[in-house]
Image (cartoon, coloured by chain):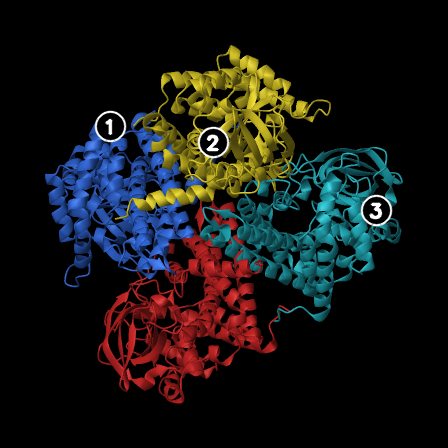
Chain colours: A red, B blue, C yellow, D cyan
Amino acid sequence: MDFAFDAATGELHARLSAFMDEYVYPAEPVLAAELADPARDPWATPAIVRELQQRARERDLWNLFHRLPNLGYAPLAELTGRSIQLAPAATNCAAPDTGNMELLEQFGDEEQRKQWLEPLLAGEIRSAFAMTEPEVASSDASNIETRIERVGEEYLVNGRKWYITGAMNPACAVFIVMGKTDPDGDPRRQQSMILVPRDTPGVTVRRGMTVFGYDDRDHGGHAEVLFEDVRVPAGNLIGEPGSGFAIAQARLGPGRIHHCMRAIGMAERALELMCRRAGERVAFGRPLAAQGVVQDWIAESRVRIEQARLLVLKTAWLMDTVGNKGAHTEIQAIKIVVPQTVEWILDKAVQAHGAAGVSQDTPLAQLWAGNRTLRLADGPDEVHRRSLARRELRKYQG
Amino acid sequence: MDFAFDAATGELHARLSAFMDEYVYPAEPVLAAELADPARDPWATPAIVRELQQRARERDLWNLFHRLPNLGYAPLAELTGRSIQLAPAATNCAAPDTGNMELLEQFGDEEQRKQWLEPLLAGEIRSAFAMTEPEVASSDASNIETRIERVGEEYLVNGRKWYITGAMNPACAVFIVMGKTDPDGDPRRQQSMILVPRDTPGVTVRRGMTVFGYDDRDHGGHAEVLFEDVRVPAGNLIGEPGSGFAIAQARLGPGRIHHCMRAIGMAERALELMCRRAGERVAFGRPLAAQGVVQDWIAESRVRIEQARLLVLKTAWLMDTVGNKGAHTEIQAIKIVVPQTVEWILDKAVQAHGAAGVSQDTPLAQLWAGNRTLRLADGPDEVHRRSLARRELRKYQG
Amino acid sequence: MDFAFDAATGELHARLSAFMDEYVYPAEPVLAAELADPARDPWATPAIVRELQQRARERDLWNLFHRLPNLGYAPLAELTGRSIQLAPAATNCAAPDTGNMELLEQFGDEEQRKQWLEPLLAGEIRSAFAMTEPEVASSDASNIETRIERVGEEYLVNGRKWYITGAMNPACAVFIVMGKTDPDGDPRRQQSMILVPRDTPGVTVRRGMTVFGYDDRDHGGHAEVLFEDVRVPAGNLIGEPGSGFAIAQARLGPGRIHHCMRAIGMAERALELMCRRAGERVAFGRPLAAQGVVQDWIAESRVRIEQARLLVLKTAWLMDTVGNKGAHTEIQAIKIVVPQTVEWILDKAVQAHGAAGVSQDTPLAQLWAGNRTLRLADGPDEVHRRSLARRELRKYQG
Amino acid sequence: MDFAFDAATGELHARLSAFMDEYVYPAEPVLAAELADPARDPWATPAIVRELQQRARERDLWNLFHRLPNLGYAPLAELTGRSIQLAPAATNCAAPDTGNMELLEQFGDEEQRKQWLEPLLAGEIRSAFAMTEPEVASSDASNIETRIERVGEEYLVNGRKWYITGAMNPACAVFIVMGKTDPDGDPRRQQSMILVPRDTPGVTVRRGMTVFGYDDRDHGGHAEVLFEDVRVPAGNLIGEPGSGFAIAQARLGPGRIHHCMRAIGMAERALELMCRRAGERVAFGRPLAAQGVVQDWIAESRVRIEQARLLVLKTAWLMDTVGNKGAHTEIQAIKIVVPQTVEWILDKAVQAHGAAGVSQDTPLAQLWAGNRTLRLADGPDEVHRRSLARRELRKYQG
């Protein structure tokens, strides 16, 4: 057992950290100004992101998720989480593109990889993953109502999806849509995934859904999308018909750990902001930093972050050594614990900032909202807790 | 001791309840559509509110806060909290106008009452209360930096305020501004309050502050306001110079209990939505309502609401019988406990709704954000907890 | 609605309070010394209790639970909870005798009342209530395994019970035993209750069960009791055969509220001890009372107690005005919330006392253990939460 | 970074695990019977412990703490925590002897090591560490009131200590006493430590202190000890006069991590018991294992244990690689988080067991009490939280 980074990870970490200091943090106010500009397309990729992407390529900080094992990527993803609106996009490591790229690499055929994976890896287009539906509890995939029907040499797609992250961005060129090709089959073989180009007739990006008041325009929002008699070539199906559930499982594991890695970085940023604020703000004759309750928040935050990070790292190590399936319990564990940990810390950081904490003048409220959705996205906590408990219980069954 | 409503309260409660059913709840989607209309002034009082106000006047449900003792008003205010964007405004019982009207009634002179109180009671204008400042912990009034200087027959006001609720609404005709007239005096006699008409030169309503992404345009937003060499007649000062701290104390007690009453109603609404959703939504073969964890949330919500409401009612009774000062501990207690109780319930209601819970398609996320600010507004929880504890400790000191 | 005590309650409260100050609190060290005496029967009623009982009779503070409506009794029971080892017994208001006396009054026949109720009301004997069984989840009465079989003019009782409070005391003259007379009948008509004198052949009081290391010898401990072919006259059956479930329901409601009333008093005592300790103890140059975290505990304790007490009082009022059945939800609510509230406060009081808090030198650890069992006794929290939630959910069902 | 055990640790872990299965778990009821025997000295080392010690020596599982680095010892200590009354003593790895042995090894002179360390390593005697005092907050060493005065060739010791673990055991041959040799010196140079043989005149082992009703007789209880004009040779002083504070710091770090390692094992045992119980117990027609709330407890327990264990392991690794001082933050972090984590799990395990959970028939209640004291022992949580927060805050100070 050894808790030290290897040399290569240490070097990359130092390089990315310097990049953050030199380019990313200073770009935060630039982004805010750009997003507030009423003259621009509110959903388009911000110019400052394009600029940072150029810098990241120059510094060989591009596609980090794609080049490294999970354990090597984890500390880097955490760093990017410290500036969540900029750093993941700048390094082409932003969700949902990362998951989509991995999916295409693993399950796409040569044609699909050429058409979609290459421009994604190059950062030329963006993509979306269309699974969640408004009418059903999508955490139970057997509920999914979208239909993908084979009609001759095409598939016909019909359904309604929402919270399709990134889809408001006009650069989002393709949707990976989950639906049922065989609604009467075995519950885990009913679903398939299919590539639907954005400009296909019958695709309507209807509106941006909000998250506690935020439209998240910086990363393409969260769209409600209608698929009405959408026709795509049969070759757009990913893998075999009926493989959608298995592909989703394969995609979601790494997706979850990436979210958790970045969320740790968000918590570190929040703790830093809380400490700085506590040092500066005076109430009733003493800085907040000298007040016992605030100290308590800070200590608890530090203790919780340390624990959560270690579990994320161990999960990454397990994924690398025994595979995603062998790390199933740990992936669920971090999916459960990281968002609630980060939420607690963000809440305290908000409180320490007073009105500024809920405002647009600090990143805290928006971080809070983004992190809050992680308790729901890719299955609500309760589903994962139930599943994890049942595996634990089975250990002791006759 | 008796826990039953008296007949008059029962009758008003039934009348208001019928009004909610007949007019208010059906108006909620109307309001949403109106607020989404890009053609209208985003900050103006919505037409549907004006319409409901007319209905409320006809049904003698106008200015309820002004006609009733606290204990009689409490169950009515709770009802209005169930439709927080519409019902308080419809009955002319919305913050901050209620507190401002009480302030003018109690401390304003005849001229001030005539000029500002009468149109407020008639619902012709709206008003704002400008206390919080961005640069200091305003919960400690000795920090306030805004200056109100006597210059001949006028006062000169200079300062920066933010989170001035309602001030973005063009109908908001007047600000009650807290500042220091005597910055070197006794810490509790340094402050004064002064009436500043919105159109006075030097007043700049600079921007709307957001609350977790919401601009709260339905009730006039939360403005940052600059006062730069603003001159108003000396007669605009409320009460004596140096009485600002005492007036603030007098104003904030009732303001706090009103917030708490309405928040109980928000919690009831959330619990109802959670129960309805749990009955409808099916996951893994069973409705949420049959799942133990969801049942646990519902039971805990009911138990917490019952307790919090009783403490609010007892506080109202104390205010009516022994005065606001005699109810000081209880006012602090509800200020502490109600927002955290309601936040917990809203969080669970959001979770039970999945993605819809964080979206614009249910009221839950916006209710959550609004309630979250109550842990900060009028002094953060921590200030009230410290103060309450010190009073408790004094009971046992030699 | 009115939150003031009526005059009669106020007078009794003052009288009981004076009795506590004059006799009960000073008797606490006397009791400790007596219980530590190796020469005495460890389970017998302590002499100091007998002495206080005489004083209480003289002052007309005897059988308070029996003379007063629930709302009048509540504040008095709370007071006795402040010295839980002495005051309830001193006033003949201790569990399980109170519940047993009410049961006999309501369901016993003349003969049963004469034989057992009269000496109980006179404090001459004590009694036990034998429901809980070690082998089954007794919160679900359909699980009960004890058999009560009619054989000619007698009933034959066979079963094993445990945590039979008071039964180790040799003065405990009678057990009210719950068992099945009709194990194949309707689930709610299978059970009956029967009076079993302690000295009946076949009754074995096997051992004292402990509660976190305490044997609770001061109030007769918690016995494991075997009933092996125990024969009692048929007239010992209480009410009709098959009425055991209904009698249990009738008994448990008031029993639960009595526990809750006293637990509020325990919490007040703990808060007082915490405040006194905080005023006296110095660490790192300041008294604990000046430290923010300790202040936070004190404020939270006060806020929680106020809420819980009001819900207990409202429940008492409901029981008096609409009956135990009409107060079912509220009885469950206090059963859920009071023990967890009091546990939280006791935990903080222990923490503020350091090692003394877990020791025999303060009452806190023993109070904690006693209160902890309330989360299990008469049905664990989880059963009550589930039941309360299902009633809440039914409000919104088609 | 690597999360796998090395081969040597794996082998020892398997060997100890087999020893637990073969000898230790089966000895638990033997110990209970022995402790309940009224004929034996209640405080003496139980015969079954002596027997297990012989087995452990044979299997080369003796003095594990002494032979291994912290990271190698951690998983073994965790295993012993699964049977906390037997396994640490069986392997001569029980507190406070382990800490005392390390102290003597590091700071004792040759004579002291020969006289006390050798028989301790051989398991022939036991020892106690006398720091805590009843009258002061001992977490702040400057409060300590015990005096150690040089008088000619002797030291004169006067003071009162309590919660001196192990001291009731007649085999406890020596006390390491902390007191002030220079009460007016620099606050961190006032204290010294001195060896006081149990049979020295003036030493009175006055009584056993209890922990939530438990006297902990299995491991020598927790004594109140008086030192009245106790004279020991000057050579009994450990290290230099004035080095007591530094020695205490050096001793407490490893002591804390040992407690935390074992506490993780306690939590694993509790989780196992909870799962087994949940599988067996039926209420309302379904096993507890199928009920959502119980599943939630189990999932949460697993998630918390995994996190806490990793932080303990990382702390051990830090102590081995950068020393106790470099691991200061992490030692505090585990001291804060492990006991609260384990307490939560034990509480749920108790609840799942119903009355059995609080009784002497499962180990849960006693484990709870023992673990609860860890939130107080070696400094209450609040002291460590404050200290950790201040270090965190210093990172961001100009």
Given the current orientation, which residue lies at the most extreme top position?
C58
Which residue does the image show at 55% across and 22% down from the upper left? C89
Instruction: Report the residue marked by disc 1.
Output: B6
Q: Nearer the viewer, residue D333 or D192?
A: D333
- Check the residue under mark 2 and report the chain it is in: C
Q: In the structure shown, which secondary structural element does the residue marked by tag 3 occupy?
A: loop
Callout 1 crowding tier (Cα within 10 Å): few <14, some 14–19, many ≥20: few
- Check the residue under mark 1 and report the chain it is in: B
Q: In the picture provided, is B347 more to the left or to the right than C116?
A: left
Can marks 3 and 2 be said to lie on one chain? no
Q: CA distance from mark 2 to mark 1?
A: 44 Å
Is residue C205 among what the camera can see?
Answer: yes
Q: Amino acid at mark 3?
A: Ile
Relative to D199, say whether A50 is above or below.
below
Which image quadrant for residue C196? top right
Where is residue C146? Give x, y as percent: 54, 36
Front disc: 2 or 1: 2
Where is residue D22? Give x, y as percent: 73, 57
Instruction: Report the residue marked by disc 3.
Output: D125
Given the current orientation, which residue lies at the most extreme front position?
C152
Can marks 3 and 1 be said to lie on one chain? no
Instruction: Report the residue marked by disc 2.
Output: C192
